[in-house]
Amino acid sequence: MPTIDPWGAELPAEYERIVTSFGLEQFSPTIFPEPNRLMRRGVVFGGRDLKIIADCIRNKKPFYALSGIMPSADKIHFGNKIVVENLRYFQDHGGHTVILIADLEAGCTRGVTLEDARRRAMEFHIPAYLALGLDPKKTVFYFQSENKAVMNLGYEFAKKITLNEFEAIYGAADPGRIMAAVTQAGDMVYPQLATRMPGIIPVGVDQDPHLRLCRDVVARTKTKYNFFPPSSLYHKFTPSLDGDLKMSKSKPGSAIELPEEPAVVCKKLKNALSGGRDTLDEHRRLGGQPEKDMVFELMKQHLVEDDVELQRIYAQYKSGKLLSGELKQMGCDLITEFMTDFTKKLDKARKQVGKLHFVKFG
């Protein structure tokens, strides 16, 4: 069985194998009403206890959608956009939306001071999430370091876990990771301290260990708290432009940052792994391979909203009528439009930070 590492050391390549190995539910876009682009196109591929959330949506029952911001850098990469889009889906379908700023985890696992974490969150990360689509009027924010209830839950949960169990889930154990993990478990159920209700956490599948740990400890503390175990929704990674499984800031030439100058991104797209054939004649005769093309993958995941238009691009590339260079130019035009729009929205969102709903403690 593979070990999934939420801190980034190992990432399995076979999503189907992940579903089987970790007992995930195979996602079907029919489970939720009005599935978004990511759900329709198979970018969302699995989850846990999804029917509970589907029932809440269809019957207008209360539920929450929660995610965390790790303010360990001054920028994020393009793949983070997927989490925000899925959060916005649940927000639009009645979910009480909570964003935690994981400043304690940033300190434990990345060595970031609380001061730097707060600055990055307020100046960039929170505005970026708003610019990517979160409704500021429907979103609640808090900092881990200010939330005593979460820290108390973390200590409570720590009593329910053995070192062997932690190592079985994460593959390794050190004090910083243990503290970060039990604190995250507290974050995931924190909204239920006010109102007991189901919740869903949309994340990349590398974060599943945190969900498994939380669900395990919730089951063991049921007599005291009676929390709903959090549901989860998993998406595929936005691949690196060189074809690796996951886009990463550690490989800047193959990752797209937010924000980034369109001219810089276009240069990266020109060098991205292509599904084109070796020669023009071969491409016209055999057709392109969109399944292997990283620019087409960006279009599928992020840049082309209309399914009919995406299918048209796919068919033209597959038939050989559309060349690799032409596809890359289309991608460049689309990413330029996106970056220009994102920058404008980011500037506007920075002016809204002082008006946001932050949980007040003490």
Image (cartoon, rainbow, N blue to C red):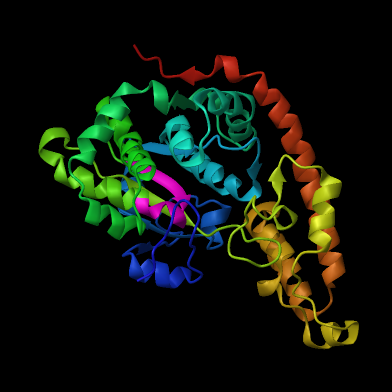
Residue name at image x 59 percent, y 20 percent: 353
Find residue 296 and report its image quarter.
bottom right
- Quarter containing the C terminus: top left
Check the image and report above or below for 32 versus 60.
below
Residue name at image x 48 percent, y 36 percent: 106
Could you tell me if residue 47 is visible in this image? yes
Could you tell me if residue 196 is visible in this image? no
Find residue 327 and report its image quarter.
bottom right
Assess whether residue 6 is covered by the magenta stretch.
no
Q: Position of residue 342 (x, y in %)?
A: 72, 37
Assess whether residue 205 is covered by the magenta stretch.
yes
307 and 150: which is toward the camera = 150
- Quarter containing the N terminus: bottom left
119 and 53: which is toward the camera = 119
Q: In the rendered structure, which segment of residues is drawn in magenta?
A: 199-209
**Side of 86 relative to 167 (left or right):** right
45 and 143: which is toward the camera = 143
Residue name at image x 76 percent, y 64 percent: 272
**Side of 198 relative to 67 (left or right):** left
**Side of 167 relative to 251 (left or right):** left
Q: Position of residue 73 (x, y in %)?
A: 61, 37
Q: Position of residue 323 (x, y in %)?
A: 85, 73
Q: Position of residue 247 (x, y in %)?
A: 63, 56
Residue name at image x 54 percent, y 22 percent: 115
